Image (spheres, rainbow, N blue to C red):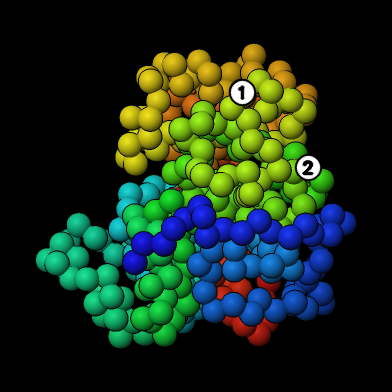
Amino acid sequence: MQIRVWSKMAKQPQANPSTSRSSQPGEHGVFSVAFSHRHLLSISQLDQNDIVNLLDRAQAMVPVSRQPRQDHPPLAGKTQINLFFENSTRTQASFEIAGKRLGALVVNMALKTSSINKGETLIDTAVTLNAMQPDVIVVRHASAGAVELLSQKTSCSVINAGDGAHEHPTQALLDALTIRRHKGRISGLTVAICGDVVNSRVARSNLALLGALNVRTRVIAPRQLLPAGIEQLCSEVFTDMNEGLKGVDVVMMLRLQKERSSNALVPSEREYYHFYGLNEQKLKNAKPDAIIMHPGPMNRGVEIDPEIADSERSVITEQVEMGVAVRMAVLDALLNKNTKAMQ
Ligand code: NCD
């Protein structure tokens, strides 16, 4: 099933800008606000309270993640299957570590040796895995909508780890957590999302999340890398990077998605870097304390200057660490409905 990725997304209603932390864990580390969803398929399915709830749970998971050994891990006895039909280094490892740190039995499907290569359909694969009684299946797939389809054929929870150019909800949550830890808030900030927007599930999930939290979002890209209707989904659109970066609090760079033929849409990587690569000179337009983000993997020298990527203002490796905390929080929120959020 293919779903139309950009046109389906409605602009989020403006949220209360004062909301930054509303679902604090109370006594015994139990969240008063339950997470009511069975799956995490998209940011668009969540409202502002759901998002803040997950961010607060993830914040509480950071120390748990740093000190992983526990006597009574909350997901002991639960089974998590990671089903990645697309290449992944950090996301798959991050979900695996998150599940294991919470005590789940984690199974990584080796797709190169699985029956998918014998012609089994996605639905047959889902039904087969479901018969093994997992509690959650984490899925990455090249087709937008494939993860939602799979969720309709299983009786367990399903988490979308990226479906085509549609959504990548845990990436947007980890980006938001990283921003909140650096800026102390999210609402009221100005965030620039720069680069290959048309092919980016990261951009799409981030625009949904930031829109729900009343963030001013700027999208910066050459015309050919902007999806039709993008003006409806963000506060401002720029094709000039120097203009677009003026006064922003956060610069979020996107990878040029060569596997989705994005490089055919630009004259050359050299020219792309000249106009849209983040370097010291362009960064001078942003606020002096602006942070630099990238979901990885990076094309150094294509969308970002290697020195900028490694500079003090870069929070790229912290994003990776927050990814584990966010995935722990999401697994815990979906699988452990009663108590939760250990501190
Ligand atoms: C992103 C993805 O796969 O969508 N990466 C990731 O999850 N770490 C972004 C990208 O591949 O460019």
Q: Residue at x 33, y 29 (%)?
A: 264
Q: Residue at x 36, y 62 (%)?
A: 2
- Read off the residue under disc 1: 240
| Residue 318 x %, y % | 61, 42
| Residue 87 x %, y % | 33, 49
| Mark closest to the chain's N terminus, 1 or 2 | 2
Q: Distance of mark 1 from mark 2, alpha carbons?
A: 20 Å
Which mark is on residue 189? 2
User: Is 35 rendered above or below residue 139?
Assistant: below
Query: Which quarter of the figure is the C terminus placed in?
Result: bottom right
Going by the image, does 248 lie left or right of 114? right
* Residue type (three-letter) at the residue carrying disc 2: Leu
Query: How many numbered badges does the structure rendering display?
Result: 2
Q: Residue at x 51, y 31 (%)?
A: 223
| Residue 320 x %, y % | 54, 46
Going by the image, does 134 lie left or right of 42? left
| Disc 2 packing (10 Å; few <14; some 14–19; many ≥20) | some
